[in-house]
Image (cartoon, rainbow, N blue to C red):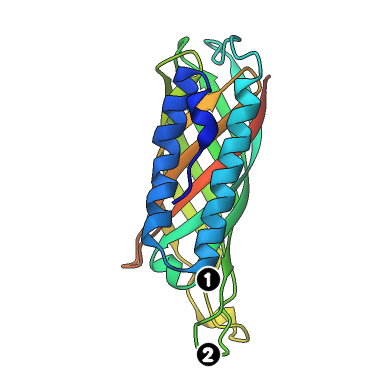
Amino acid sequence: MFQIGFLHSAKPSMAKYLQNGLCLIQYYYSLNENTTMKNTLKFLATAATATAIFFSTTNVKAQTITPDKLRFGVGVEGGLATGSAHDFSNAELGGTARLQYGLSNNFAITLTSGYYNFFGKDEPGTNVKYQSLGMVPIKAGIKYFYTSNLYLGAEVGAGIETKTFLPQGIDENFVNKDTKLILSPALGYATKHWDVGVRYENYSGQSNNYGLVALRLAYGFGI
C-alpha cells in the first residue's frame, strides 16, 4: 500500500479532497495482484499527487464559474480498465474537449466529447495479443461546487466504439461495434483555468458491461 505523505501539510480542504479521490485508486491497488496494473495505479497516484502539489501552491481564490457565460477546456487523461474490459486491457489514455455553461456561482452544465483508447494486452500464457478498443464519448453533465474550488460531477451519454478488443490479425469487419450507455460520477478540483478530476465511468449495453477509473487534467478559459 502506498502513502501520500504530504497530505498532512497540505491545506485542510485539499487534503480532504485527495483522501476521498485517491482512496478509490488505493482500493484497486490493494485488490489487484497484477504487476502491470499496480504500476499503472502507482502512476495515477503520482500524477494526482503532483497535480495537487501544483494547485496547493497556486492562487486558487479566483471564481471558477461565471453565471450565463461559456467556458471551453481541453484535457488529457489516463485510466484503468475495470469489469470485463480488464480481461483485455490494463490502461486507457484519452483526450477530451468540454463546454461548460454557468447557471449560478456554484452550478454548471457541461458537454464533453473526445477519444478514449483502451490499450490491448497479451493473453497470459499464450501468444495472443489483443488490439486496442477505441471509443468516442458524447456526454452531458452537471458540476456542483460545494466550496470555491471543490466540486461533484455527474455525466450521462453515449460511447461509440470505433474498434473493439480482438486478437490481432482478425478482420474487424466481421465484428459489430457497439454504442454504450455512459454513466459517470466524479470528484474534482478547479481554479480559474485548471481542472483536475477523478471519476468512474460505467459502459453498459449489448450484455457487455465494463468500466473505467480515470484521472483527467484540463486547461480552460472563458469564451
- In front: 26, or 131? 26
Please state which amino acid type lies under the numbered disc 2: Thr
Q: Residue at x 57, y 37 (%)?
A: 49
Q: Residue at x 45, y 50 (%)?
A: 158
Q: Look at mark 2 in the image and give the residue it sits on.
A: 126
Task: Report whether residue 148 is seen.
Answer: yes
- Front: mark 2 or 1: 2
Q: CA distance from mark 2 to mark 1?
A: 20 Å
Answer whether labels 2 and 1 touch (C-beta < 8 Å).
Answer: no
Residue located farthest toward the bottom when viewing the structure as drawn: 126
Residue 130 to residue 79: above or below: below
Secondary structure beneath dot 2 equals loop
Res. 182 in view: no
Left or right: residue 82 versus residue 55 is left
* For residue 62, side relative to residue 19 (left or right): right
Task: Please state the horizontal and vertical placement of residue 124, each as a whole percent of the image.
Answer: 49, 83
Element under disc 1? loop
User: What residue is shown at x 46% (from left), y 32% (from top)?
Assistant: 18
Label 1 packing within 10 angstroms: few (<14), some (14-19), many (20+): some
Residue 181 position in % (x across, y down): 38, 52
Residue 4: image location, x then y, percent: 51, 38
Q: Which residue is mark 1?
A: 164
**x 56%, y 33%: residue:** 196
Which quadrant does the C terminus fall into?
top right
Farthest residue in the left direction? 207
Decide which of 155, 126 is in the foreground and name it.
126
Other-residue count near label 2 (Cα within 10 Å), few / some / many at <14 / 14–19 / ≥20? few
Quarter location, residue 57: top right
Kind of residue at badge 1: Thr
Q: Check the image and report above or below for 152 versus 23.
A: above
Q: Position of residue 192 (x, y in %)?
A: 63, 17
Name the N-terminal-most of marks 2 and 1. 2
